[in-house]
Image: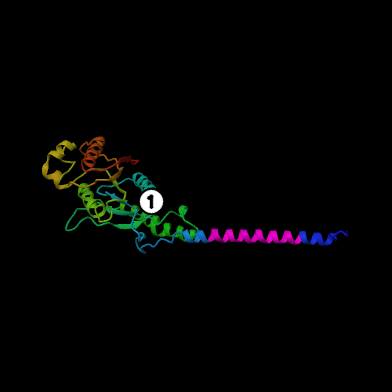
């Protein structure tokens, strides 16, 4: 019997290999198309934000209220340290977290207004390249969030001195107008206070009373007038160390505030002593 031509056998093998490669390529294409379609299907939609506050339309994820007390002068070193600490706090906020800035002031006619209100738009380091432009994310962070807050903190720390220091009144107002707003009860809340912690108003003054929380709480009128609902609020104190004409122990002042905050339901309380003596 005659044998088959070798060229014909090689041709069929070549064709079989080509069909196999085509099939493999088609299979890989189908798999790749499926993966891409899945990614496109599950890819999160770009977050819709308020054009002014940058807050997400779905709601804020937390609240950080910053209260800056500029009643008395602050040395350049203390200002620089305060700005460094505030920058770190701003950077540690979560995406979608609201940052509200307040300046101590007498409460006359209406609650203490916020100086500015901005939401963390998301760190450029966490930007998803599938749904955002990293360059635009960086610009938004620098020009609409961190940059404006840095400028505001610098301005407030250089503000003119005042004749009174309504710390408790300011915190009381923030507890109502910021932390107490509808929809904020369940989100994490933080109060940041930049101050020497020396309360000085007609309601109560550390300059004319012994710095002792027990004595203060026994004064029913002052204690009740200055009460604040701080349940679930963590507190970060950036403490400005100050030398006063009447010797007032810094430790006594800090201990007074720890007792006051605990009495009104505050959560974790942490104090950072800023560099310099004012």
Please say whether residue 205 is visible from this viewpoint: yes
The boundaries of the magenta stretch are 14-36
State left or right for residue 175 relative to residue 34: left
Residue at the outermost bottom position? 51
- Mark 1, residue position: 94
Residue drawn 63% across the image and 61% down it: 26
Depth order, front residue of 103/46: 46
Task: Tell me where residue 101 appears, x and y as whole percent.
Answer: 30, 54
Q: Residue furthest front?
A: 1
Q: State the residue in front, 219 or 147.
A: 219
> Magenta stretch: residue 24 in it?
yes
Q: Position of residue 134 (x, y in %)?
A: 49, 58
Q: Would you say the magenta stretch is mainly helix, strand or loop?
A: helix
In the rendered structure, does residue 87 fall within the stretch colored magenta? no
Foreground residue among 114 and 265: 265
- Residue at x 26%, y 54% (from the top left corner): 178
Q: Residue 65, percent across and down?
A: 30, 51
Residue positioned most to the right: 2
């Amino acid at each position: 019997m005659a044998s088959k031509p070798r060229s014909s056998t090689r041709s069929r093998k070549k064709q079989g290999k080509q069909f196999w490669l085509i099939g493999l390529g088609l299979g890989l294409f189908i798999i790749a198309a499926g993966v891409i379609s899945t990614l496109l299907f599950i890819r999160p939609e770009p977050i819709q934000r308020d054009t002014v506050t940058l807050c997400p339309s779905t709601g804020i994820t937390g609240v950080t209220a910053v209260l800056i007390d500029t009643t008395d002068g602050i040395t350049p070193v203390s200002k620089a340290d305060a700005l460094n600490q505030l920058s770190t706090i701003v950077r540690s906020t979560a995406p979608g977290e609201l940052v509200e800035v307040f300046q101590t002031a007498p409460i006359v006619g209406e609650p203490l207004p916020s100086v500015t209100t901005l939401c963390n738009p998301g760190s450029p380091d966490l930007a998803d390249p599938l749904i955002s432009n990293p360059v635009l994310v960086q610009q938004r962070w620098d020009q609409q969030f961190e940059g404006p807050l840095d400028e505001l903190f610098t301005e407030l720390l250089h503000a003119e001195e005042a004749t009174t220091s309504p710390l408790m009144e300011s915190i009381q107002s923030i507890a109502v107008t910021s932390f107490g707003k509808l929809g904020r009860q369940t989100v994490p809340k933080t109060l940041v206070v930049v101050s020497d912690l020396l309360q000085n108003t007609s309601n109560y003054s550390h300059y004319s009373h012994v710095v002792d929380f027990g004595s203060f709480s026994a004064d029913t009128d002052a204690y009740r007038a200055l009460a604040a609902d701080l349940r679930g609020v963590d507190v970060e104190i950036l403490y400005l160390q100050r030398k006063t004409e009447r010797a007032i122990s810094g430790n006594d002042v800090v201990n007074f505030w720890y007792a006051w905050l605990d009495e009104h339901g505050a959560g974790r309380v942490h104090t950072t002593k800023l560099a310099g003596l004012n």
